[in-house]
Amino acid sequence: MFEHLNVVATAVFVFFFGLVSVLGFVAARWKAADLGHIHEWGLGGRRFGRWITWFLLGGDLYTAYTVIAIPAVVFAIGAYGFFAVPYTIIVYPLLYLWLPRLWAVSHRHGYMTAGDFVLGRYGHRGLELAVALTGVLATMPYIALQLVGLEKVISALGFSGQGIMAHAPITIAFAILALFTYRSGLRAPAMIAFVKDAMIYIFIIAAVVIIPYELGGFGAIFEAAGKAFDAKVAANPKLAAGLTLKSTQVAPYITLAVGSAMALFMYPHALTGALAASSGRAIRFNTMALPAYSFVLGLIALLGLMAIAAGVKVETPQDAVPQLMLWAFPDWFAGFCFAAIALGALVPAAVMSIGAANTFTRNIWKPFIHPQMSPQEESVLAKLASLAVKVGALAVIFFMPTQFALDLQLLGGVWMVQIFPAMILGLYTRRFSGWALLMGWAAGMIVGTSLSWTGRAWVPVHALKWDLPLVGSVDLGLGFGAYNGLTAVLVNLFLAAALSLVLRPHAVDETSPEDYEDRVLA
Amino acid sequence: MKFVLLLVPCLLALWVPLYNSIPPVLFGIPFFFWFQLVLIPISALAIVAADRIGKG
């Protein structure tokens, strides 16, 4: 089990992992308050200023899975994997407009989750439940994928076990994570994020300086990668790969970027990080400062091409980055990079489990099982739910093939964007009714899921022609495919708009227009 | 004006045919890659500018 272990790298790795574990427990005393209250445990008491929010959201959104998976796609097929860049470019101008409004109304009414806001705005329990279930369902596989990222770096350290022992390292790592999240709540990932983000910046700056130097410059890297893609395509003419997009990839590239941008802040972990901010000003600052992480993400994507140029040997594309680190760096620094990636799994996994736990407690358990819950009881339940979510994620990794988590994550994105109409339209207008939005959501979920199933595998993109029951074959004649999340949310929007003309909104709206105003700005 | 500032970087990022090419190469990096990387700080500056105007 340990015979191939890289001792130096492992020692560095364990040192940093131990350091942040201590931080995670110490975090309970940071900005000390009663952690028995759900607003304190689950939202850090909404007291995170602009810089803490920057580290927390950066650590939360740009995950270990991203660091592994984006370069893996670039490694495998080139330009297409870069879609994450336009995605993160368009998301911040949109967030600049939306997020301060959502923060303001949530601050005024004590909302902690998307479900809280939807209930307050539309007075509709069914819509609240739909929004909450979507969030929990989409988050679970996302946490599982953080574990995949963790497993990749641990196996790169040379650890190889059989049976139960194969999963021993991530089980230990996750147990530590579960304990400090249980104890410290959102304060733990916020504090760890400082260390994690600093390490990621060091890792990536070193990588983009040293590796091109070793490989003879960026020109040589792109040349080698271009040749490798040409050879791949020559061997398999159906494969769309290269340093630029093939014509069939352009529309999927654009729609994937748009749909992913719409979905991002629908996820519970993104909202949890944002609503924990102390002011609308801190939120706006972050829409200007978070692109720094996007730039790093772009550089990380380039690691995929560097791995090709370096000629690293991999079993799956997801090994490209860890193997590149081992190829390029001395053992101690490779261990440092692996620790950075591993912490990159812990921060989001912690925030995701807290976001999912808040959602489960406030929007599923409380309204339907135990309406008279006190904030203290909510906190107890949320802590337990955060444990349950992590055990669930571990179980997925133990007992299901990794492909299962990947497929669910893909579908999770398609599902998550279906709450976009209720959330974002709701920030501006009450012309839509709860029932209409619920019907739109249901239609979007069905359309998005069925478009994604090809009969053999789940795929994110579908051509814009369909065989519809009763209607027959419909072809928009555009000759390109689009991201299913986007196609489905358009169906969702049209249906919600049409039904709102019939099903008028009569329910009570507890918010008023001035609740959405950012007071500092006004 | 505020909305134009927010909109322009989004449109540039989504107008893929504009930058889907190898030349012009910069420091050995194809246009497709460096254009999108450069657009990230530009989009951040556009939000800063929009914010200044909004407060004005």
Image (tube, rainbow, N blue to C red):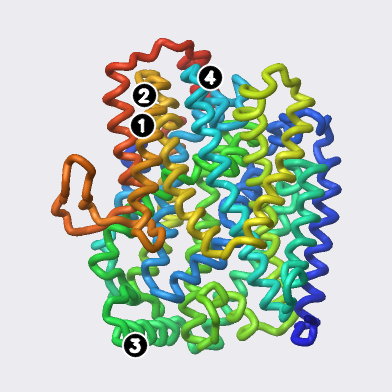
Which residue in the protein does label 4 denote? A120
Under circle 3, the secondary element is helix
Q: Earlier in the sequence, mark 2 or mark 3?
A: 3
Q: Are marks 2 and 1 in contact (CB under 8 Å)?
A: yes
Q: Earlier in the sequence, mark 4 or mark 1?
A: 4
Q: Are marks 2 and 4 in contact (CB under 8 Å)?
A: no
Which residue in the protein does label 2 denote? A436
Three-letter amino acid code at the position of disc 1: Gly
Q: Are marks 3 and 1 in contact (CB under 8 Å)?
A: no
Three-letter amino acid code at the position of disc 2: Ala
The chain ID associated with circle 4 is A
Three-letter amino acid code at the position of disc 3: Ala
Q: Are marks 2 and 3 on the same chain?
A: yes
Q: Are marks 3 and 1 on the same chain?
A: yes
The front one of A185 and A47 is A185
Location of residue A277 (image quadrant): top right
Crowd rating for badge 3 (residues with CA inside 10 Å; few <14, some 14–19, many 20+): few
Location of residue A78 (image quadrant): bottom left
Which residue in the protein does label 3 denote? A231
Q: Are marks 4 and 1 on the same chain?
A: yes
Q: Is residue A188 left or right of residue B51?
A: right
- Which corner quadrant holds the N terminus of chain A? bottom right
The front one of A363 and B29 is A363
Crowd rating for badge 1 (residues with CA inside 10 Å; few <14, some 14–19, many 20+): many
Q: Earlier in the sequence, mark 4 or mark 3?
A: 4
Which residue in the protein does label 1 denote? A440
As drawn, which residue projects farthest toward the left? Answer: A477
Measure how far apart labels 3 and 1 are at the Cα level. Answer: 46 Å
Under circle 4, the secondary element is helix
